Structures are given as structure tokens and as C-alpha cells.
Image (tube, helix red, strand yellow):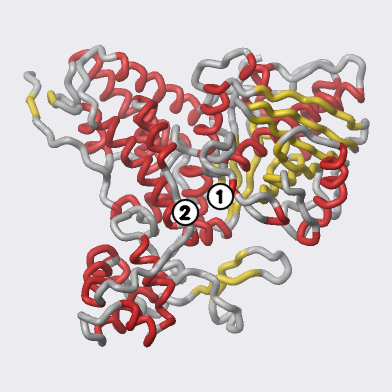
Amino acid sequence: MTATSEKMAIPQPRPADEVMKTARLAAIQPSRLSGTRAFMNKMIRECWDISNVLFDVDGNAEGTVIYSIKAPGQEFSFIGFSRPPSRTARTGRIIGQAWDMMGTLIEGPATEAEIETARREIPKLYTGRATAKTLIWCRSNRSMRVFDQTMAALADGRQPAVEDIAKVCYLMRNTGLDGNGTFGTRSFPSLGASHALGGVLQAQLLTAYLMREFSCDLVEHLAAKASDKAVKLDPQLRRYIGVGNGSALGLIFFVHKHPRLINALVSARENAIVAARGMKLEAGDARATTLVDLLRQAIAFRRQDRMVYETFASSVEVADDLEKIVTALEEFCRSGTVLGRNADYPLDILASEFVDELVPEAYETFLSLLIELVPEEADRLLAAAHGPDELSVSPAEAVEDLKALVRDEYQWALDTDMSAPDAYKYVWYKSETAEEPRRGAREEVPEALDLGLDICGSIQSLFSDLDEEDGAQSVARFLMKHPEHRYMVARIQSLRGQGYHTPRANINAEAFVPIDLVRLMNVGIHGIDKTRDFLSRNLRGVLYHGAPTPDDLRAGYSGTWYYPAEPVL
């Protein structure tokens, strides 16, 4: 059969109305632009030197540890305080009284004054105060069963069973990464672009990596304290082990409070995908072969995934769908045709043809792997991503122009039925007992102050009041009469022309699935793997799953560390 020839237009970014649907945002998978992967690439590229300089911990896990982190032109220290696990006060919540490790990331060497201040202040949390050099305060807890199994195996002179590790893929779980002014830590905007940790989330990401290293060092240390025949973790297993992470509904507030940052990160991803889809390839092109290899690695990772997912597509479904893309790519590598067609942009054909055929997680995995074919462009886009929080009013704009802007960019909000019985069924409030965000039926918490951002209702109310005013009137005069609309006007005007800033959803409605936006942050933006959901409110996953160790970084690591295969020991 003769292949048909097809000319296609140059690929364009996906429309915001498609990308910003919450179900699609939830499906976005880790990529080169996600936090952990981008930061790991930076440490590899710049040959960061991370070493343990103190591990003064007794056999009961009580003591102090210090790590030195040397980046090009800058040094940091991680100070950790290890404690025996408490069976009563131990919790992952901010209201807890005890954690298995509390620590801090500071600028410069760890002086005795810094160590003692951290020892005294960190346990106080809200009433404690960080030093001027402090970037992050953190807390973590052991995965008791897996940690104990691993320690017992090492003490016995053998490696722990891979199948036991693979059930959770971590020894300790992050329960708090606080910075950017919290507890008196240094504000991130003050760091500047030239700072080694001046990029988005980089101080938190380094701290999480050091949690991973501490957990592995601790289990080896305690095993050695318990037995003279203890062995260390096999390097393959040590890479495979990540650090656990739990997240809940507070991330939904983050998405709405940082619209410029969300737009910058989503936009960078979409433009990197376009750059890859727009590559002209021929049969035998090494980039197509590379993509096949990456897809096969992702398939193997999914086939070995032991997690059980309640809401999202299973890893079996994702792997099966990725196989379909591999089959089509192998056809291209052999014959230069895609699905029996010749085309200028073969990867664009695949992206166009498979969008409705695959489960969303599989499709977004494919798009994420496309980005690996344009690494320089992707890194440039991420470096340019900038998301200042300030939103300001343009007072001289005419009311008629503001109305046109609302119609042009927020028609989805105007079309949302806010008079429906369930439009305001739920309210977002802060729990008095757990001090965490909650979502509850409005009738059950009638006195609660709604902390959620009512985008749809606010837009409709604003538009209705704009409609009553003279179109030639200035926004300044309009706001003098209607000051209640000031924030929404500032938001609309400041985000003009930026399409990827606001999820297309009424978060107070019954149809809204809260876990969707939590998953966007955890998976797409932070780069967390194997995220399992609990009651559609909480997510648990793994950071730095498969990441190089400090020894690997010093040796000049090269390779593909993400989507790790289970070690064969």
C-alpha cells in the first residue's frame, strides 16, 4: 500500500480552554520542566558537591547531622536533628508535637551559633524564629514498616527485599518544607536570579533531596550500631529509594494565589511541547530512536508500579496505551511514515491522532517525553519563567475595554451556571483542630469564612456591575463606586493575554474534584512520581525516585535517572 503524503501547518500551543480544564491539569506528568527533574539536572550539570560532615547519632536515633552543599560559587549547610520515633505525638500535620527529623537549610557553613539556634527554635514552629541565613525549616517521619525492615536486613548483612521497598519507594516522608518568610526564613524574591537557589522552588527541592540522603544514611548508621556484620545499601537500591511526600487541599489555594507563576510554568511546558512537535524528522533519525527508548523506559516503570490508584488511571492502562505510541514510532523508524502517512511533522501527527485515543496520563506522558528531544529549548523556557505575585489595577482603562477583556478571556466563567442548586454547595475553610484547609458542605459549616477564590461568581458580579456603567468611564471611577471588585479587576488586567493562569472550574460546586489541582502541583509542577490519592483529597507520592546520589554527582553522572526500574540484586 502506498503511503499518502500530508502537509500540515506548523504546530501551535494547545488552547488554554483545553489545557486548563482541571481533569487535563490532573493528568500532566513529570517532565524536564518539573521541579525535581529540573533541579536534579542543574546539580548534575554544575557538579554540585554534597557531603556529610557530621553524623552524631546514637543507636536510639537521637542526635545531630550536618551536610555541606557546595554549588558553583556558593555554599549551603543542612542541619538535621534526629529523634526516636514517637508512637503518640508523631504526626505529619503542622499541629504535631514530634517528628523523626527536624532540620534547616542555611546559607554558608554551619556554625555552632547556627546549630544551637536551630536546635532551640525549630521545635517551637509558630513561636520559633529562624536566623537571617535560613532558607528552609523542614520535618520528616519514617515509613515505620519499610524503615524497620530495611534496617533489620542491613544489620543481618543482607539487602532488603526489593518488593518490600517498592511498595512505597521511600524510607522517610516529607511532612513540611517551610520557607519564603515563614518563621522568619529569608524571602525567596530577595535571593535574585544569580543565587544558586534563586529558581522556582529550588530551596525546597534541595532540602527534599537531603531528606532522601539523610534517610539512607540513617538506616545504614542504625544498622551498623545494631550489628558488626551490617552492610550498606546497594548503590542501585539507594538510587531507587526516594523521599515520600504527602499533600492536601492547601495546594489549591497556592494555584489561585500565584496565577502568574502557574501561567509561566504551564506556558513553558506547552511551548516546549510545540518545539518538539514541530521538528522535521526522517526515518532513522536518532531523535525518534531516543523517544522510543524513553517510552520503553516509562512502560517498564509503569509495568513494575505496585501502587493502587483509586481515582486515576492504573499504571497497566498507561503502559498499554504507551505501547500504541511505540508501535507507531517504530513504523516511522522503519519506513518514514506515521500511521501510513508521510508528513512534515511526524511527532505532531502522533500528538494529534492519539489525543482522544489514550488515557490522559498516557498522552501527557508522551508529551512530557517529547520535551526531552529539545533539552536546550526546554531549559531556556524554564529559565525565563517568572511569576511575580503583584497584581495591579490599570486605572485609566475604559470600562468598555475592561468588559471586552472579560468577554474575550473569561467567557468560560460567564457561561458557568452559578444559580444552579449545587453551585455553592461547598465552602473552603481552615480547620480549628488541624490548622489545615478543609472543604465541607456549606450547610454543615454555616459560620465558616469561605477562603476559596470564587472566580466564576466574582467575574459574573463584576461584569454585571460594569454593564450598568458608562463604557467611556475609567476603571478608577468605577472602582470608587464598587471597591469590592478591586482585586478581581487587578487580576484580570494583570493577567491580560496570559492564558494558562486559572483552572476552568467553579471550586465551590459539587462537580469540582479537589484532587485534580493538588495533582497538578504534585505531579506536573513538582515532579512527584507514583501519586496515590486518598478520598479525593490527599496525595502521597515519591520525590527523587531513581535520582543520582551525591557519590554519583561527584563522579560526573550521566544517564536517564527518572522512571527507574526495580533493582535486580
The type of residue carrying mark 1 is: Pro
Reading the image, the residue beneath label 2 is: 388
The structure residue drawn at horizontal position 44% and vertical position 27%, both measured from the top left corner, is 299
How many callouts does the rendering have?
A: 2
The structure residue drawn at horizontal position 45% and vertical position 51%, both measured from the top left corner, is 387
Residue 189 circle label: 1
The structure residue drawn at horizontal position 76% and vertical position 32%, both measured from the top left corner, is 109
Against 421, residue 284 (above or below) is above
Gap in angstroms between the C-alphas marked 1 and 2: 9 Å
In the rendering, at what x and y percent does residue 266 appear? 39, 46
Against 188, residue 206 (above or below) is above
In the rendering, at what x and y percent does residue 501 appear? 38, 56
Quadrant in the picture for the C terminus: top right
Q: Is residue 369 visible?
A: yes
Against 30, residue 521 (above or below) is below
In the rendering, at what x and y percent does residue 541 appear? 59, 42
Q: Residues within 10 Å of mark 1 (few under 14, many from 20)?
A: few
Q: Is residue 180 left or right of residue 298?
A: right
Judged from the image, the secondary structure of the residue bearing numbered disc 2 is: loop
The type of residue carrying mark 2 is: Pro
